[in-house]
Image (tube, rainbow, N blue to C red):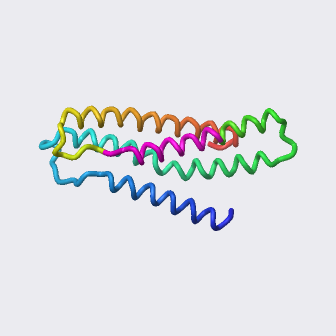
Amino acid sequence: MNTSKIILFAIIFLAACGKSEKNRPEQKADISDNPNQALYEQVMDVHDEVMPKNGQLYQLKRELQEKMKATDLSDDTKKQLGEIIHELDSADKAMMNWMHRFSPLPDTANREAAREYLEDEMEKIKKVRDLTEGVLQKAKDKLGKK
């Protein structure tokens, strides 16, 4: 793999992780003081579960791209590989978009509005998780991996 591509990927990955940390409100409030804190933590737990899988998305994409270069593959197989590569890119983009848009309301905001926002974000990040896990499995199956 090209060293500059590895470095670029690492920088993007670390920047994305760092950005999510900046979005986390200070952990000053006890959960009993702010019932939304528990919901916020649940949202971030799902994020923290999925984010490390972005490296797998990238690695599987590279492997599928290498497999596509084989001259003995049918056009249909190459098309299938291309579709999976596109889905891997879509899952990665979905996580990046979610992270860039995630902006929890401050503790001073209306608690009801904050709860509604966090519930909505929980649904969004669960969709990202499901998309990521699904395409990872599809790519692994196509490559004959467990």
Above or below residue 108? Residue 120 is: above
Q: Quadrant of the N terminus?
A: bottom right
Q: Is residue 79 left or right of residue 59?
A: right
> Measured from the top left, where is residue 26 in percent x and y?
23, 54
Q: How many marks?
A: 0
Residue 105 placement: quadrant: top left
The magenta stretch is: 86-103
The rendered magenta stretch, by its main secondary structure, is classed as helix
91 falls in the magenta region: yes
Pinpoint residue 36: horizontal percent, then vertical percent: 21, 39
Q: Residue at x 60, y 51 (%)?
A: 58
Q: Is residue 4 above or below residue 105?
A: below
Residue at screen point 69% across, 41% down: 144
Q: Position of residue 114 (x, y in %)?
A: 24, 37
Q: In the displayed orientation, state which residue is furthest to the left.
A: 33
Q: Is residue 17 above or below residue 90?
A: below
Please provide percent x and percent y for residue 84: 66, 38
Identify whether 108 is placed above or below 11: above
Q: From the viewer's perspective, tell me whether residue 37 is left or right of residue 78.
A: left
Q: State left or right for residue 55 relative to residue 22.
A: right
Left or right: 144 in relation to 123:
right
Q: Residue pushed farthest bottom?
A: 3
Could you say which quadrant of the image residue 18 lies in? bottom left
The front one of 96 and 139 is: 96
- Residue in view at x 16 percent, y 49 percent: 29
Residue in the foreground of this view, choosing between 111 and 88: 111
The residue at 65%/48% (across/down) is: 61
